[in-house]
Amino acid sequence: MRDVNTGCGEITVDCSTCHDLNDFNEYTDNQGIYKSIGGEGFCSNWSPVRPSNDDLLDQAQTTTNLYFQELFGQFMSHMAAAIAEVNADPDDDKVDPFVEVFPHCPELAAEIASDFSRDTGSLVRRVSNRTRNARNTPDDWQAKKLEEFEKMAEQGKKRTLFNITRPDGSTMPTMEYEATAFTNEEDIEYFNYMRSVTIPGLDKLPCLKCHGSIEDGTVTADVLEAIEGLYPYDMALGYKAGNIRGAWTVKIPVVEGKSGNND
């Protein structure tokens, strides 16, 4: 209801207007009105207020940082638990703990993206041209940008610095590419944001344990067998440190209006 509060001089709308606070996920009549006709259903003086391009970019970057950090933290928790379980019985045959860890990453990413989409009102995803989970298939614009990111990486093009907070509170600097564009779908304007996901070295993150290869020793036979069992159409192996794995994406609804481009 942000656009109602900022676009109307007559009323101020709070959460209880559209949500039963005892069950925040419960739909109300007012929420249905807002979904069908927007803020004008609540205020005769209402007009949509368009965020600035800088505000949209800041919102998308912040959402991406939080999404990355949440996924990072949950994945590392799964990894620590799997390693502890493997080490608990010294007499047991040792199996690579990533056999237990790797299935969580594709599923966690989708679950966390869904949570962020619901909480922010934007469509939050992680996409790749070489998918493991088919839900991460990019749209046409995203696929084109991913190809451009790959070429930029090969050419050593300058990247933007982002500081990600690790689960232990320390800072992890990352260098990535960005792309933005405005699109129009059914008379609604959207701000589209993408940030590349670069495969880090094993000294930073263990991504290559599930995305590297048997040939260079980064993926073990146990992990490969598990991947092939769960994802028979997997295309996400064979990466090396520095390769573009995919991208974080955020699609923010703006206001009714014409589409444009801000590449």
Image (tube, rainbow, N blue to C red):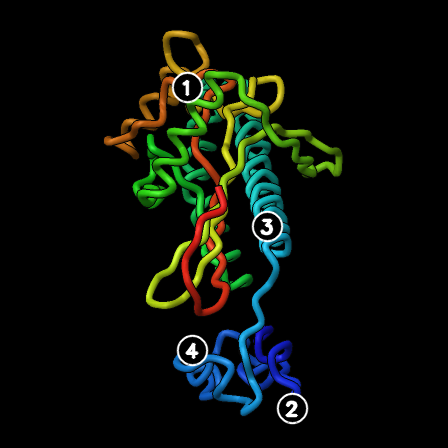
Q: Nearer the viewer, mark 1 or mark 3?
A: 3
Dot in front, 2 or 1: 2
Label 3, secondary structure: give it. Answer: helix
Establish if 57 lies above or below 26. above
Q: Which residue is mark 2?
A: 10
Q: Residue at 44% across / 42% down in the picture?
A: 126
Q: Earlier in the sequence, mark 1 or mark 4?
A: 4
* Element assignment for label 1: loop
Q: Residues within 10 Å of mark 2 (few under 14, many from 20)?
A: few
Q: Circle 1 is placed at which residue position?
A: 239
Q: Quadrant of residue 36?
A: bottom left
Q: CA distance from mark 2 to mark 1?
A: 56 Å
N-term-proximal mark, 2 vs 1: 2
Crowding at dot 4, Cα within 10 Å, few <14 / some 14-19 / many 20+, comes out as few
Q: Nearer the viewer, mark 1 or mark 4?
A: 4
Numbered circle sitting on residue 35 = 4
Residue hosting label 3: 57
Count the marks: how many?
4
Q: Is residue 111 visible from the viewing direction of this image?
A: no
Check contact, mark 4 vs mark 3: CB within 8 A: no
Mark 3 is on which residue type? Leu
How far, Cα to Cα, is label 1 from label 4? 43 Å
Amino acid on which the number 1 mark rests in the picture? Tyr
How much space separates mark 1 and mark 3, taking CA atoms?
A: 30 Å
Residue type highlighted by circle 4: Lys
What residue appears at the point 56 percent right and 84 percent down from the top-left corner? 46
In front of the other: 181 or 175: 181
Check if mark 1's residue and mark 4's residue have beta carbons within 8 Å. Answer: no
Mark 1 Cα shell of 10 Å, populated few (<14), some (14-19), many (≥20): some
| Element assignment for label 4 | helix
Residue 125 in view here = yes
